[in-house]
């Protein structure tokens, strides 16, 4: 008895089963459309972008040398 991967979820199942033990679909069924994969990638990018941009800004802020504050001479008012 050979093990074959489910085309929906990829879990190995026995060759003669009618439904996948993990996802419940037909193991020989068609794969999900590619749009699901692209939407998942887009969601990960949308959620990761603000986090990554914050890290980049923090690193750039840490690398930036502190600029010296200009000191103004004390001026006394003499009347």
Image (cartoon, helix red, strand yellow):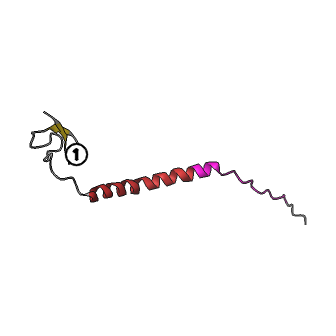
Residue at the front extreme of this rendering = 2
Out of 45 and 71, give the one closest to the viewer: 45
For the point 40% across and 57% down, which residue is it?
Answer: 46
Q: Secondary structure at mark 1?
A: loop
Q: Position of residue 59 (x, y in %)?
A: 58, 49
Q: State yes or no: residue 72 in magenta.
A: yes
Residue at the top extreme of this rendering = 1
For the point 48% across and 52% down, which residue is it?
Answer: 52
Q: Is residue 8 left or right of residue 41?
A: left
Q: Is residue 24 left or right of residue 55?
A: left
Q: Is residue 76 left or right of residue 8?
A: right
In this picture, which residue range is highlighted in magenta?
59-74
Classify 60 as above or below 1: below
For the point 42% across and 52% down, which residue is it?
Answer: 48
Out of 28 and 33, give the one closest to the viewer: 28
CA neighbours of label 1 inside 10 A, class few (<14), some (14 to 19), many (20+) = some
Q: What is the magenta segment's predominant secondary structure?
A: loop
The C terminus sits in image quarter: bottom right
Residue at the bottom extreme of this rendering = 79
Out of 40 and 16, give the one closest to the viewer: 16
Out of 35 and 69, give the one closest to the viewer: 35
Q: State yes or no: residue 4 in magenta.
A: no
Q: Position of residue 78 (x, y in %)?
A: 90, 64
Q: Position of residue 34 (x, y in %)?
A: 27, 57
Residue at the right extreme of this rendering = 79
Residue tagged 1: 9
Q: Position of residue 4 (x, y in %)?
A: 18, 40
For the point 56% across and 50% down, which residue is it?
Answer: 58
The N terminus sits in image quarter: top left
């Amino acid at each position: 008895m050979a093990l074959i991967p489910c085309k929906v979820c990829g879990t190995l199942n026995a060759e003669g089963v009618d439904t996948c033990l993990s996802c419940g679909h037909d193991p020989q069924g068609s794969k999900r459309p590619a749009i699901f994969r692209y939407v998942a990638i887009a969601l990960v990018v949308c959620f990761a972008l603000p986090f990554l941009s914050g890290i980049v800004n923090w690193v750039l802020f840490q690398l930036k040398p502190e600029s010296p504050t200009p000191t103004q001479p004390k001026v006394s008012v003499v009347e």
